Amino acid sequence: MKSHLPLLILLLLSATACDSLFGTKQDATTREIFEEGRQDPTQVTDDVGYAALTPFWGGFNNPTDVYVGYDELVYVTDADGVHVLDRAGRRFGAPFPLRGAVAVVQDRKLNLYVAARIDTVIAGLDPNVTWDLPAVFKIRGLNGGEPVTVLDTLIHPFRTFDSSRSTTSAERARLVKGSPTSDELVEVTGLAVLGDNTLYVTRRGPANATGTSQAPDNTVLIFQEEVVAGVRTDKMRNIGQIRALSPTTPSLASAVGLSSISTFIGPPQRDNMSADKSFLLAQGDPTQNVPYRVIWVNVVETVDGTVYQPNSGLLAQDTSRADRFLYEQNRFTRPADVAFAADGRNFIFVVDAARDSLYMFQSNGLEGINPPVGSSSAKAINVSFGGTGNGPRQFNEPSGVAYFRQVVYVADKRNGRIARYKLNTDFE
């Protein structure tokens, strides 16, 4: 037995050395590889920029949105419904079927909200006609914590969805097949939550008259949980629409052809969340001439009520600090989604479905990240990228973007995948 002792010691030392070089399944390096993927070796690492984390997640049917929730699971909408994955890309069973699912978000109670379409028969109008209407579904249990339950279904144009349609006649006025202003032409395009679980919903459609009792189609709707006898329920009710945003005239405070919304509140979960109600909007309708397609709207509470103010400070473009800016006219063509890094980095991410690109801005509007300490340059380093294709830094109609723990997720629609990226400086 003694003759084998030196060999055993050598093997143990060798194993220890390998662990120190390559990591074990318990160390942070290996956990990152298993959860987030490896840095693509084809990416140039000498320059600061976003590197692909491979393998990308494939097998989706035209994915439209991606979101990392407060439960730290990843939610993806596509033509098959809602997929639930862990951060290693492992799926939680089959997708939850919802037709035309386009957006997903989670509140701090871990309820999921999904924008999709629903077939609706209105017996009092015509029991033989089925209407294809936009809806928001409130769902609990898709993360496996409890049985899956649809807690509420908010259907446009009914008054629980839009409180400005306060009568039965108002609800049904535009339910006309083939009409150029039919409610079937309305779309729900984006969802976002606040720290108190208030839900923002972006809507767009053909009817945008102002000065009437009914809200225009192009608007942001605000929802909160219904309170009955002083007790909060799981049912949601529309408490108003943000009519300060012009539905037809592009500006720094408009809602022309809305395609997405993001608040400045997001995972990870914290005991004390900001009470900020401000938001970012993407105006993605390519048929409209919109110089500023991604805008920042500040929400300010005054003695006279809530005021929605454009963040016009972003118009100040210091070319000594950056070459490109968020508030650069015609910077985008068809922004499909916008996301905010709520972990203190305060990055703003935009995917443009027409330009097949991912853009990153700082909260001061500068495009890119600050140069490293000791750099001879004072300008932000532009890390936006893209191009049409299926390569690791290319897209084909990107439609959703999310951020969580230094990783950016992109719903690459026509490539049928979720692409993931991380700043190569964050690997250090």
Image (cartoon, rainbow, N blue to C red):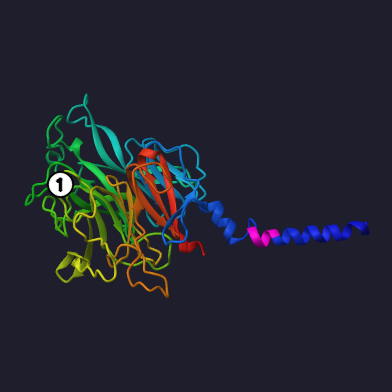
Magenta part of the chain: 18-22
Residue name at image x 44 percent, y 49 percent: 74
The residue beneath circle 1 is 288
Tell me residue 354's x, y (percent). 27, 45
Query: Is any part of residue 238 visible from this angle?
Result: yes
Query: Is any part of residue 23 visible from this angle?
Result: no
Viewer-nearest residue: 199 or 320: 320
Viewer-nearest residue: 82 or 291: 291
Q: Quadrant of residue 101?
A: top left
Looking at this rendering, what residue extends furthest in the left direction?
A: 211
Viewer-nearest residue: 399 or 196: 399
Residue name at image x 32 percent, y 46 percent: 356
Residue type, label 1 = Gln
Q: How many marks?
A: 1
Q: Quadrant of residue 80?
A: top left
Q: Is residue 136 above or below residue 327?
A: above
Tell me residue 205's x, y (percent). 17, 42
Residue 240 on the magenta segment: no
